[in-house]
Image (cartoon, rainbow, N blue to C red):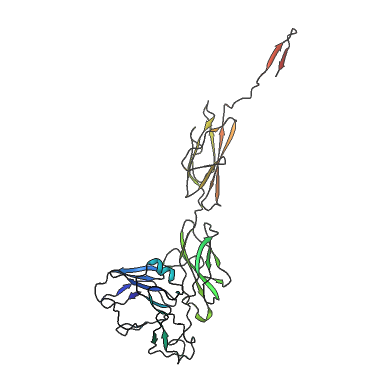
Amino acid sequence: GLGNYWWGNDLTVTTGDLTGHWHHVAASYDGSTRILYLDGAEVGRDAPSLHAVPTADNLRLGLTGNSEYFSGSLDEVRVWSLARTPAQVQADMRAVPALPQTGLVAYFNLDQGTPGGNNSGQATVYDLASGVAGTLINVALSGSTSNWVESYAMVVPTTTATTSRTATSFMANWTAPAVGTVDNYVVEASTSSDFSTLVGGTPSTAPATNHLQTITGLTPSTTYYYRVRADKASVAGQGAYSNVSTVATPSDISTLNNLALSAGAIAPAFDAGTTGYTFTLPTGVNSTTVTPTAGGPNETIRVNGVVLASGKPSPILILNDATNLITVEVTAEDGTTKTTYTVTVTNNCPLQAVAKNVNVTLGADGKATVRY
């Protein structure tokens, strides 16, 4: 879980497991509404009614007024004199702020000391916004825990638009972190926005030189979420997750729900799995329209090569030959999967070829002469 301590007005929200990775946490208060953010997303809000925010007390990092210590690491601590908007929180959470900056009254980048080294002379914490110095209390300043340690908080990649999307796979893309060293990237994909379960062979690893990874084994017509984190051997597993990107795999359905001719019923009766049909024109009829009905989302339907909307009749097709072929090609949303239906139309009274501009002359000998 996650909480914002405020005497008599604590705000606590339930989250997934946050241990082991860096996360950005922010709380804003505009005088009436308090909002709690986790990794740029709002996770809770309320309207506290007691105990206004003090302005004269000392600022404590990692400790409450009841001497409750934070069990974890802190980096990039900032205090603002104004309520930040959601857009501002998201834009600044992985960026180093320019100084000075309006409203930024305290900024501790916590970059002092040697990670894991002997830092007995590094007990001072500097506020880069105001120049005021703070003091570390009850910190051993040696070893790998109660000390200045290597931080991977700001080494965060950014996901970008997916490419090479198919019904069962997509290419996840991202840009490298603005700062820090990366040994490799870890990619996760899920059908849940909270990544409670992972799919597609993830988590998968990509080398530091790669900023893309193909996610395979997916289900058509399904929404997926993916995120990326950087990794480094010395801080293995601690990398903060990138922004979450969403991608929907396209449908691979390329069948029809119905196929009808205005001139009469095809044989056999339409079935999506049957692709070949016949029809005999009634006497005196030499044309028909065709109305196909899509069986999947965003299909492309072509009748004799002409694109046609689902459920709409085609232009009139003239069928003067004894045997006529109507072709209906259906392409799935994925752009690859195709099914072709055919209707063989028989015309028992086809138009016969006749001669035009023919002159017949009967000679004295009784023989006819034909000129054309």
Decide if residue 212 is in sight here.
Answer: yes
The image shows residue 64 at horizontal and vertical percentages of 32, 82
Of the 4 image quadrants, the one containing the N terminus is bottom left
Residue that extends furthest to the left in the rendered view of this protein: 50
Q: Is residue 244 left or right of residue 340?
A: left
The image shows residue 95 at horizontal and vertical percentages of 46, 72
Q: Residue 35 is drawn in which quadrant? A: bottom left
Q: Residue at x 57, y 69 (%)?
A: 210
Residue that extends furthest to the bottom in the rendered view of this protein: 120
As rendered, which of 245 and 352 lies closer to the eye? 245
The image shows residue 315 at horizontal and vertical percentages of 52, 35
The image shows residue 345 at horizontal and vertical percentages of 56, 34
- Residue 71 vertical placement versus 355 (above, below): below
Q: Is residue 201 left or right of residue 10?
A: right
Residue that extends furthest to the right in the rendered view of this protein: 365
- Residue 88 vertical placement versus 291 (above, below): below
Q: Residue 30 is drawn in which quadrant? A: bottom left
Q: Residue 213 is drawn in which quadrant? A: bottom right
- Residue 149 vertical placement versus 28 (above, below): below
Q: How many marks?
A: 0
As rendered, which of 82 and 353 lies closer to the eye? 82
Of the 4 image quadrants, the one containing the C terminus is top right
Decide if residue 196 is in sight here.
Answer: no
